[in-house]
Image (spheres, rainbow, N blue to C red):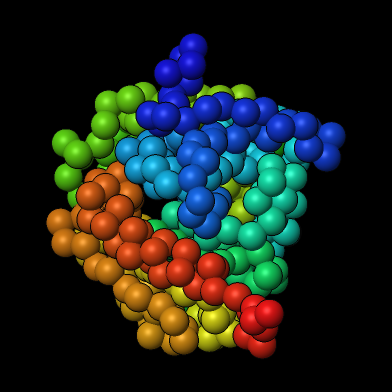
Amino acid sequence: MTGDRLLPAGAREVFLPFEGGTVRLLTGGAGPGTPVVLLHGGGSDNAAISWYPVLAELARDRPVLALDLPGFGYTTGIEPAGPPGTTADLAVRIAAAAGHPRAVWGGVSMGGDIALRVALRRPGAVAGLLLVAPGGLTGLAGGSRTRHAAAWLGTRIPEPVMRPLARLAGLGARATARAVVHDPDTMPAPVVDEFVRESRRPGAGIGFYRYNRATVGPGGMRDDLSEQVRAISAPALFVHGLQDRWVSPGDSRRAAAAMPDAELVEVGRCGHWAQLERAGAFLESAARLLTRVDDAERKPPAGDDHHA
């Protein structure tokens, strides 16, 4: 912990001056492996919450960078953009400014949507993808027209009205945090406490509100990448809890089947946050992907001649 802020084991907190504001980064590791850049989810999430039990192990043999996106956590002075493509471009610039112009990009939920867009918009920046229940892969919010209509109506609430409503929603944050997983007893107490703090932060919820406003259309999702992901050639891993009530495991199945080099790991007795609820299964799968990426990144480009 730093003051009353959560820090994953082994993480260093860095505040990076960036484009007129300050980005909070959690960094760890310094080994020879391919760097990893991690993006958190939406709602009352931030880098420490999403990656609390796994950052240290991921950083065991490589640099790891987890960032608070604008509108979340302890990043300040940068307006949250809303559209995930715009946020993806911003995240690439942040990673480059922090010394990682090429990396494995990891993301959970909303962060997975953004990571997929990084791969589509800036393929040279992406050595691989590590995705946990990623968003951006469905035509309807919640998987049904009824739920989608309700989500659409929520995005029509004017932002000045949404701000006090978000503060009221924060009163139920502890219950919400436990509802994201299949077994609430697996949620580390420090993560739940940080989730509550995040929900009560000034401006909490506006980053996710703008994301939803940009992605939820009146008759369907504007950010559905189901067809576009076929163009992603980077090796990818999808990890999805079978009891996920927030993002359908079917979204990851279809995307993994469509992509040329993707593996899907479905985790039983697990909800939306597999990297928290089943950290061991997540890390085992991630280690396989990272080994593959490291081997590929060490190979010289095709056509290079290293003979004297």
In the depicted structure, whether residue 82 falls above or below residue 70: below
Q: Is residue 165 visible?
A: no
Task: Give 254 or 247, whichever is nearer the viewer.
Answer: 254
> Given the current orientation, which residue lies at the most extreme front position?
308
User: The N terminus is located in which quarter?
Assistant: top left
Task: Give 82 or 300, whichever is nearer the viewer.
Answer: 300
> Given the current orientation, which residue lies at the most extreme right position?
20
Image quarter for residue 254? bottom left
| Position of residue 44 measured from the top left corner of the image (x, y, whole percent) | 48, 38
In the depicted structure, whether residue 230 falls above or below residue 85: below
Which residue is painted at 54% across and 34% down in the image? 26
Which residue is painted at 53% across and 68% down in the image? 298
Which residue is painted at 67% across and 28% down in the image? 15
Image quarter for residue 80? top right
In the depicted structure, whether residue 137 falls above or below residue 205: below
Image quarter for residue 223? bottom right
The total number of labels drawn is 0
Q: Is residue 31 visible?
A: yes
> Given the current orientation, which residue lies at the most extreme top position?
3
Residue 16 relative to residue 153: left or right: right
Residue 106 relative to residue 187: left or right: right
Which residue is painted at 71% across and 32% down in the image? 16
| Position of residue 31 measured from the top left corner of the image (x, y, whole percent) | 49, 45
User: The C terminus is located in which quarter?
Assistant: bottom right
| Position of residue 43 measured from the top left corner of the image (x, y, whole percent) | 49, 43
